[in-house]
Every structure is written in C-alpha cells, then in structure tokens.
Image (spheres, grey):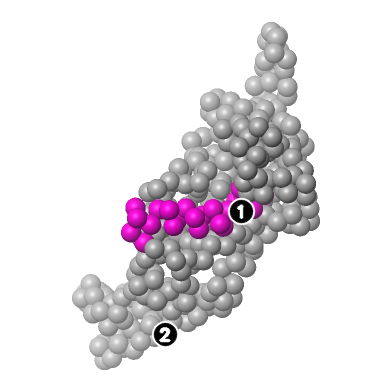
Amino acid sequence: MNITLPVKIGRGQASSKQKEIYILSLEKFANDMIEIQKGIDFQMGARGWCYALEPGGLGKDDFDWAQKKIQECRLLGYLKPGFILEEDGHIVSEFEDTSTDPEDYFNNEYNDWQQSEQTFTDSWKWFSSVSFWDYQKYYIQILVEKSDLKSLFMKVCSKYGIAIANMRGWGSLEQKATMAANFERAERKGLTPVLLACGDFDPPGIHISKALEKQFDEYKVFTGWDPKNLIVERIGLSYEFILENQLSWVDNLLTGSGKNLASPKHKFYQRNTYGIREYIQDYGERKCEANAVVVVPELGRKMLQDAIDKYLGADAYQKHENRVYEARTQIKNMIDERLS
C-alpha cells in the first residue's frame, strides 16, 4: 500500500513554511487514499480507513489523530462528499423480492413491444422476476455493529436479496420492527427466520446472540411478532481469526459512552454481565473492533458467505439462476409460438 501520512506539527505557532508543508502533506495523504479506494469495491468510514492505513505505517495510538486528519482533508476539499462512508443510523437496507408468473410477463412484454419484433424476440433474456426466498427453508437477515461492515457485506447481500442493517449500539425499536415484519412474512411462507449478527470481539460482542434473542422477545408486543422460532447466530471475529490475520487490538474495554467495562466500579463488572471477568482473564483488557476486518476484505466476505451457505446451501444461488433460466426458456417458447 502506497500511502504517505500527513506530517505532524507542534501545538505551538508554526512558521509559514511549516504550515505550507503540512497542507501539502494533507493533500498528498488524500490523493493516496483516493488511489487506494480505486482498488477496492466497498466504502469505509473514517475509523475503517484507520485500519486500512495500518499496513502503511499508521499505529493504533494514532487512530484518533488520523481521523482528525481525514476530517481536515474533507474540510479542505481534498476528499469530496461521498468518499467517506457516513453512519447510516439504523436504516434497514432491503432488496425487493418479487415473483411474476411467466405467462403474465410474456403478455406484458408482447403488448409493450408489438411494434418492435426484434426487441420483443430478445426480451426473454431480461426476465428475472423469480422469487429467491420461495424455494428456501430459511430466511436470513443480518445485523452488523459497524457501517464499514455493512458496506463490505453489501455485495454479498445484494446477490441474495438479504436485508442488512447497522446496529450502531444495540439498534432501535423501529429497526427491530422492520426486521420483525420481514421475518413474519417469511414465516407465513413456511421459512425459519435466521438472524446473523456480526459484532466486535469484546464481552458484549461475544454474547450478542443471546442479547438479540432477548431484545426481540422484549419487543414482541411492539412489533407484533413472536420470535419463538428465531435463530440468532453470531458470525465474525473469533480469537483465532484475529491472531491468524494479525488484526489490531484496542487496549481497553471502553464503551461508546466512555465507561470502562473492566472497572470494578462498573455495574456490568460487578454483576459479571456478558462474562466480563472471564473475558478479561482469557483475553485481557482489550478488544478487537469488527471493522478491523476491512484489512482482509475477501476473508471477511468469505466469513459471511460461509454462514449463508450453512443455512441456504452452497448451491442456493446457482439453483436460483437455474429457475430463472427455466422461466426464461418458457417465455422464449411463448414468444416463438406467438410470432409464428
């Protein structure tokens, strides 16, 4: 990775020459980031970029400094709007899952293209309205703890039409209501609901499955859906995965609000919530953030793909493509018959 980090200047007054060198280094830093982005097919937030810049020499202790430098590059116009992935709150990104009868599709296409025989003849090639989920045993949705992961996983999710959302904490009532409605529709079709959750490697992150099961149960009056059949599975960082890929550790157990889970004064420590004491005994007062996986993006996507294959089967998408092809063939035969 070719990246030149910005120069550091003291907090005191800097000379005009030093300021000039500093500004030029910010511009070079931004241009290097732009070049790096051209080689990857997903976006990252400022924190995700810090992990991506580690191979270029950025130390863990300088993450906060680097995030400020990225912000300066944006304010100076070196990084344009849309380059840095912003937090998207708790919006659930969904993909339309439609099903159209081949004969209906054929009639609609014929009426639209009867003035253009060649276009009508080729129209069967574009038919894709075959429901993916109508042929599955499980219906999957995904929750992640960082927007960088949502961006990283979007390519896989769009392929299958899997809804994915960023918890950013533990999510919201409305987020869970949207996902509960999706699960309820799937259950009416006979599918078993599955929630894949990818969080940090820390005490809450390791126990995320139980926490989400409890959360959906507590919300069932609000959402109107009983999650008694819900399967929640934690995917993502494991201790072995972190070590094998030399991912970075954060040397504390601070929460988003700045409270220390490792402090004997913290109520979670006192109650041993999430098995905090055992965690500290096994791994120390440190954690690995979920978006550290952006350093090995293909392994991160494979991790997700393996989890999907566990429930849908490794050949699920190919089977779906075969059904689409069968429907297209049916439509092509209808077209040939009508034109003859």
| Residue closest to the eye, 194 or 136 | 194
281 up-or-down from 120: above or below: above
Q: Position of residue 290 (x, y in %)?
A: 63, 48
Residue at horizontal 50%, vertical 80%? 319
- Residue beneath disc 2: 326
105 up-or-down from 159: above or below: below
Judge whether residue 325 can be spotted in this image.
no
| Residue closest to the eye, 316 or 277 | 277
Q: Which amino acid, by three-letter code, is at mark 1?
A: His
Q: Position of residue 287 (x, y in %)?
A: 70, 44
- Residue beneath disc 1: 207
Region of the chain picked out in magenta, as a range: 197-225
Magenta region, mostly helix, strand or loop?
A: helix
Judge whether residue 147 can be spotted in this image.
yes
SS class, disc 2 = helix
The alpha-carbon separation of the residues under discs 1 and 2 comes to 44 Å
